[in-house]
Image (tube, rainbow, N blue to C red):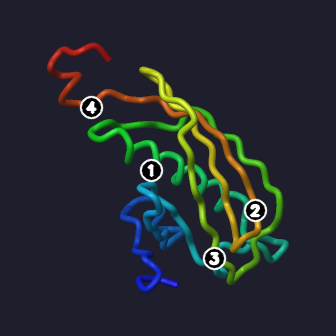
């Protein structure tokens, strides 16, 4: 399940390089992120660590928002994740996000994490919409 299914490596040289690789593909103009669960994601119950699922939900929602707002930076200001089922080691986990509302300064999103057809977690969050540095320096209101 890689390039033949439309998946490619999601670019990130920071934090995600420690827990990935995170993969991405596009469906109906929106990004889908995923990862192949392995031993590095294992918790003491021998399933995927909840923090990894939260990381994927956060990145999927933020990336979906940034993809719809070119040249704008965003930052997570609130994140809720509800764990509905465990993800086993060796399963492929996917995250899809939906933008619920965008205001001048804040965006609201939700996400669904699945293993195949099985829903394993849902997430909701708020993102601060930050002005691009170049725009702010030109004296436009932030």
Real-space Cα separation, disc 1 to disc 2, in angstroms: 20 Å
Left/right of residue 79 with respect to residue 5 in the rendered view: right
Q: Residues within 10 Å of mark 3 (few under 14, many from 20)?
A: some
Q: Considering only vertical position in the picture, is 52 above or below 111?
A: below
Which mark lies nearer to you, 4 or 2? 2
Residue mark closest to the camera, 4 vs 3: 3
Q: The C terminus lies in which quarter of the figure? A: top left
At label 2, counting other C-alpha atoms closer than 10 Å, the crowd grade (few under 14, some 14-19, many 20 or more) is: some
What whole-number distance in Å separates the C-alpha atoms at marks 3 and 2? 12 Å
In the displayed orientation, state which residue is furthest to the left.
138
The location of residue 102, given as percent across then percent down, is 48, 28
Q: Residue at x 47, y 71 (%)?
A: 23
Do the residues under discs 1 and 3 have CB atoms within 8 angstroms? no
Q: Which residue is mark 4?
A: 132
- Tell me which corner region of the image, top left, top right, bottom left or bottom right, holds residue 71: top left
Disc 1 or 2, which lies upstream in sequence?
1
Where is residue 85 drawn, in percent x and y?
A: 83, 63
Q: How much space separates mark 1 and mark 3, taking CA atoms?
A: 19 Å
* Percent of width and height locating residue 73: 35, 37
Q: Nearer the viewer, mark 1 or mark 2?
A: 2
Query: Looking at the picture, does residue 36 appear above or below residue 31?
Result: below
State the residue position of label 1: 63
**Which residue in the structure is indicated by mark 2?**
119
Numbered disc in front, either 1 or 4: 1
The structure residue drawn at horizontal position 46% and vertical position 48%, both measured from the top left corner, is 64
88 vs 100, nearest the viewer:
100
Q: Which mark is residue 92?
A: 3
Q: Earlier in the sequence, mark 1 or mark 4?
A: 1
């Amino acid at each position: 399940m890689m390039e033949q299914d439309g998946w490619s490596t999601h670019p990130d040289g920071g934090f995600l390089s420690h827990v990935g690789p995170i993969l991405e593909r596009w469906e109906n103009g929106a990004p889908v992120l995923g990862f192949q669960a392995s031993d590095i994601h294992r918790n003491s119950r021998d399933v995927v660590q909840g923090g990894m699922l939260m990381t994927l939900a956060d990145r999927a929602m933020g990336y979906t928002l940034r993809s719809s707002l070119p040249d704008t930076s965003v930052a997570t200001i609130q994140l809720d994740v509800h764990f509905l089922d465990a993800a086993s080691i060796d399963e492929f986990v996917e995250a899809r996000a939906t933008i619920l509302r965008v205001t001048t300064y804040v965006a609201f999103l939700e996400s669904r994490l699945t293993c195949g057809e099985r829903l394993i977690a849902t997430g909701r969050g708020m993102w601060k919409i930050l002005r691009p540095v170049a725009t702010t320096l030109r004296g436009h209101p932030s």
